[in-house]
Amino acid sequence: MRRTYDAVVVGAGVAGTVAARELASDHDVLVLDPASVGAGATGRSAGLIAPSLFFGEHPEMARHMNEFFRAFDGTGQFRFTERDRVDLVAEGEDGGAKAARSDAERRRDAGFPVEYIDASTVRERYPQIRTEGFVGAIEYRDTGWIDPYSYANALAESARERGATIETGTPATGIVTEADSVAGVETPAGKVKADKVVAAAGWRTRKLLAEHLTLPVRPYRTQCLVLDPDEPLGPDFPLIRVGSEHLYMRPEHNGDLLVGGGQELLEASEAETADTDTDAEFRRQVAEQLPDIVEGFEHAGIVNGWAGIDGGTPDAYPIIDAPSEAPEGLAVATGFNGLGIMLSPVVGPAIRQLLLGDPAQFALSSFELDRFDDRHDSFTIRSTSEV
């Protein structure tokens, strides 16, 4: 391994690879990861893309995400699949139809193709969705999904084409500083010099930076099951979220259905050895509830399943910042709360602004560390089902 670079990126998930890709256009960049590209939370995510839902209050940011995925489509093995999204509103849910209709109107007024539809319209447009127990849904027509592993590897290959070096199987064990500025990172093979470091190591970022910065980030576990329905899902089957049950789902290209949920808070010590398979409770929840939501799953079989560990913050927004109390030259991108795939297009321009002063086309204030007065890691994470 070379010993001197302009910048070192710690972590080869989507945040790290997209940061490396952006910096590599005019910097000599090294990416370090203890495993492989997309091996952590990235590779175990569902790959849902719905910026107008999660970031509709930040329209310029949401539009940038939507544009990025469509422009990047076809790079390497990466494919963006456009698909409507239906967020079902349960009877008795807080705010009910009135709140959902108001939410949809705010997004439509911001220029997004979003509307509230009643239960009969849901059934008309998406015949496989069972609407008993639901009053309607918010429908999004600018959404879709990707395969996270293919996406991360396409980003990595694009970064390499721009000159970045990606060293897998090599962890960064600490940040080296000199006179309150970044001087590089420590690895098992010794120090790598650099005056810019991007810490994008997922939930492990808190420990990595503990000597220099306290981050309110903690790990949590989520689960996914892929099910084989009675008949393959058609090309118009939408993305679905049932917030009241903390479940979300999307089709696979072969007509199977991916169902995600089962969030479980963990201590850092538990995260290192957490089970990477689904548990019986989550499988039972899906088996009991899915047939009441979607037709054709009364006798569905499980194709496969997995669990992954992600990092969360108290408010469900990530930390993408170069904090004033941190060493000069250090930028942080962590705590994505399950939205790291979707937010990855924001990370590149954000890192260039934070480290190089190149203005991003959207405000970064929502991601600043100093929005948190308390930096402990014993908080309860806000589920994205509540957003």
Image: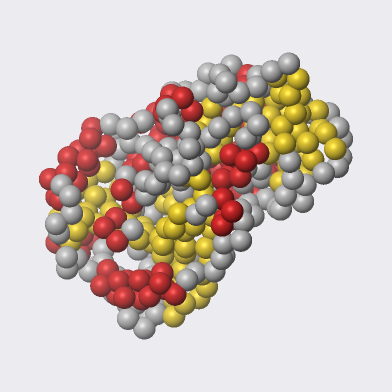
Q: Quadrant of the C terminus?
A: top left
Q: Is residue 317 above or below residue 169?
A: above
Q: Quadrant of the N terminus?
A: top right
Visible residue check, residue 46 = no
Residue drawn at x 41%, y 34% as measured from the top left: 63
Left or right of residue 76, residue 367 in this image: left
Visible residue check, residue 210 = yes
Residue 260, picture quadrant: bottom left
Report x, y in % for residue 87: 28, 54
Give the camera-side residue of 338 and 309.
Answer: 309
What colouring does the structure picture have?
A: secondary structure
Give the camera-side residue of 159 and 176.
Answer: 176
Residue 290, picture quadrant: bottom left
Report x, y in % for residue 285: 35, 71
Left or right of residue 209, residue 287 in this image: left
Residue drawn at x 29%, y 55% as measured from the top left: 243
Report x, y in % for residue 102: 17, 40
Left or right of residue 173, residue 14 in this image: left
Q: Is residue 129 above or below residue 1?
A: below
Report x, y in % for residue 134: 18, 61
Give the camera-side residue of 249 and 160.
Answer: 249
Residue drawn at x 65%, y 31% as measured from the top left: 211
Q: Is residue 162 above or below residue 328?
A: below
Residue drawn at x 55%, y 23% as measured from the top left: 323
Q: Is residue 242 above or below residue 195?
A: below
